[in-house]
Amino acid sequence: MGAISWVYRITENIVVKYARDIGAGEIERENAVYDIFEQHTPCPYVIQSFYRTANANFLPFMLASLDTRLQRNQRREKHKVLQVLQIEDRHLIERWTAELCAAVAWIESLGLVHGDLRPPNILFDERDHLKLTDFDCVARIGETSYGNAPPWARLYPDPLTGKGRWGLYGPKTEQFAIGSLLYCMTRGHEPYGHPEDNPELDVVGLFKEGVFPRLNAEGDVLDCIIDRCWAGWYDSMKDLAEAAAQLSGAADMGAATTFSAEYCSQKRNECFRLIQKGLLEMDGRRDPKKQEA
């Protein structure tokens, strides 16, 4: 379940994302973004949409998210990480890095930013290729940023008032979130989320002052990318994607694929048949009715 929608698996390989509050407009905004996406050659690292209605989006089923992978590798007590049990394979992390950066660079090529880069919005298919999802926060480059919770966004000190400001959506905001995502992948927890870190730390204030967790930027290529992302070093997501493509793990990127037009057409017809059978009618619990394909 997402913050603004329910997600249900309705067949072996299709899920439906259904608006929790039909009047809120999130599904409508995401559908409009997919209308833009579908005017261009699909990106292998951006999840495709099979079919859309005014209050629902039919998407391919994915096995896991970065969020679930991280939590699976942790010992937790509610929201606190007590121990990191293991880190994902380094080669795989490098491939994910390259795929994530390629996805965000593709969105940038359309004049847009994702605007909500967080572990729950990064999915993995059956071959562990990355698929970026959740596009209801997409904005145009240069629009005012509404920020996000730490560590996915950073307040910047205003030189005139000393107060924090999020700035404008663009390479700076996107790469900062990517830096924090890569930190999660390589450490197994969020920045300042280590079990030995003081839970009372003012992470917002630390980020605002440019105080970040210690890295080995000179000796580790992934740490170098994290450091540069947090510093806003890359002029564009294209530049970042080109740097990430040089990682040794990026050699496997080519194995990722997009669905063919024929397959999407088949799934679109399948979704339509399910709707005709009453799939999107709500029962007393506000759950879509489960129907046989």
Image: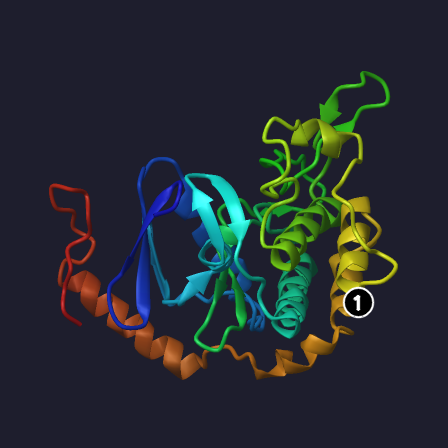
Q: Is 207 drawn above or below residue 171 in the view shown?
A: above
Which residue occupies 62% across, 39% down? 196
Q: Nearer the viewer, residue 65 or 80?
A: 80
Give residue 178's position: percent from left, percent from top. 67, 53
What's the residue type where badge 1 is placed? Answer: Ala
Quadrant for residue 293, please give it: bottom left
Which residue occupies 43% across, 53% down? 31
Q: In this rendering, would 74 be left or right of 224? A: left
Which residue occupies 15% across, 55% down? 289
Q: Nearer the viewer, residue 203 or 37?
A: 203
Give residue 259's position: percent from left, percent from top. 45, 78
Give residue 193's position: percent from left, percent from top. 60, 41
Q: Is 14 drawn above or below residue 216 in the view shown?
A: below
Badge 1 density bin: few <14, some 14–19, many ≥20, Cα 10 Å: some
Asked if one can make out residue 32 in the rendered structure from this viewpoint, the answer is no
Secondary structure at numbered mark 1 = helix
Quadrant for residue 157, please give it: top right
Q: Is 7 drawn above or below residue 151 in the view shown?
A: below
Asked if one can make out residue 8 in the rendered structure from this viewpoint, the answer is yes
Q: Nearer the viewer, residue 182 or 261?
A: 182
Q: Is 13 drawn above or below residue 82 in the view shown?
A: below
Which residue occupies 41% across, 46% down? 28
Please name the residue that numbered disc 1 is placed on: 243
Give residue 123's position: percent from left, percent from top. 48, 62
Q: How is the image coloured?
A: rainbow
Which residue reaches farthest top? Answer: 161
